[in-house]
Image (cartoon, rainbow, N blue to C red):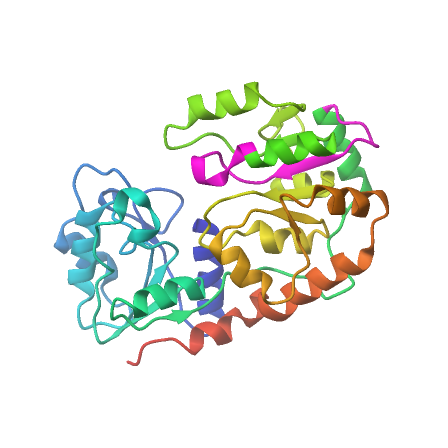
Amino acid sequence: MAVEAAKWQWALARLGFATFTVAGDGPVDHLLPGLAIGAGDPPSRHEVDAVLDGADLVVVENLCSLPLNAGAADVVASALAGRPAVLHHHDLPWQRVQFAHHPPPPTDPRWSQVVINELSRHQLGNRGLSATTVYNAFDIPKAGHGDGDGDPGTRERVRRHLDVSPDECLILQPTRAIPRKNVAGGVALATRLGATFWLLGPAEDGYDDGLRAVLAAAGCRVVSGLPGDGDPVSVTDAYRACDVVALPSTWEGFGNPTIESAVHRRPLAIGPYPVATELAAFGFDWFGLAETDRLAAWLAAPDPRLLDTNLAVAATHFSLDDLPDRIAAILPSW
């Protein structure tokens, strides 16, 4: 979410706004600890008013979406009443079982409600809220000039770090580990393909024991995390080193690996989460988790036309270059 917020900040700057950031933690311009998830006390109305003094427009990133700090959300919503604001929703309460009973986000005539998928837009509409979809945006090279391996030495270096041989199939799941990320589905795919499975992120939200059980039962070799001692490996390097990207999730609000796999010219094996169907309709050519034979055949004789198609679709519909215009179209009136 922080990455998407940074892209919005860049786009707003392109539209002529002088921008600054406010959050409960992290490297931001103004730190208000009461905004953080799990903060003991929300910020005071005075603190919020002071930090937003003089702002012409406020973009609220998910704070008023999921009730992870309901007190802070209430204070911010009160401070923004009657002021131009964009409530940027990455998630909505009923999309999480534990928050299903919570009400929709707050509204105001001078606010724009923005979501990252059409499913959420329709769900808000069914609850009486009008919203606009602005899909996540990505820095995408022009069709035919995908990132691919970048520096060929990067792929070799990272695979050496992981003790993965040049002819070994490496499946990357570039996510953290929580139940809805379905790590077991990624492991099962790697097992069927005789591949090594690489899980990039850690267990979160108390899923440590669950992840250990999944990995202990794996029928394939498993690598976890980013190696970094003395020779750091980035997420971009991980994409360059892998042969297949796996996104076996049962739920994602968007699922950035759908586009990142296209940028890095890697085939994607994807789970049947609802928004995946929405994104696939743009014309992507992906492999379902159960399409092992089709994916194995492609890996045996890679057809670059599949990668070209995915990159072209990503560039047409999800380019960062187009984000300023998409944001300009939804800005509230002054």
Left-right relation of 273 to 84: right
Quarter of the image with the C terminus in it: bottom left
- Where residue 320 appears, x then y in whole percent? 57, 65
Front residue of this view, candidates 144 and 290:
290
Residue 187 located within the stretch drawn in magenta: no
Does the rendering let one see residue 57? Answer: no
Does residue 129 appear left or right of residue 216 in this picture?
Answer: left
Q: Quadrant of residue 197?
A: top right
Left or right, 204 with reference to 99: right
Q: How many marks?
A: 0
At x 62%, y 52%, the residue is 260
Decide whether residue 171 is among the magenta residues: yes
The spot of residue 102 in percent (x, y) is 21, 51
Would residue 213 be seen by someone viewing this image from the given angle? yes
Residue drawn at point x = 38 percent, y = 42 percent: 26
Q: Residue furthest top?
A: 216
Q: Nearer the viewer, residue 246 or 3?
A: 246
**Image side of residue 100 versus residue 115, left or right:** left
Residue 329, percent from left and from top: 43, 78
Residue most extreme to the right: 301
Q: Position of residue 196 (x, y in %)?
A: 70, 29
Specify start and end residues of the magenta stretch as a single range.
163-184
Q: Identify the residue shown where x is 13% and y is 55%.
A: 46
Residue under the image location 46 percent in, 50 percent down = 252
**Residue 193 quadrant:** top right
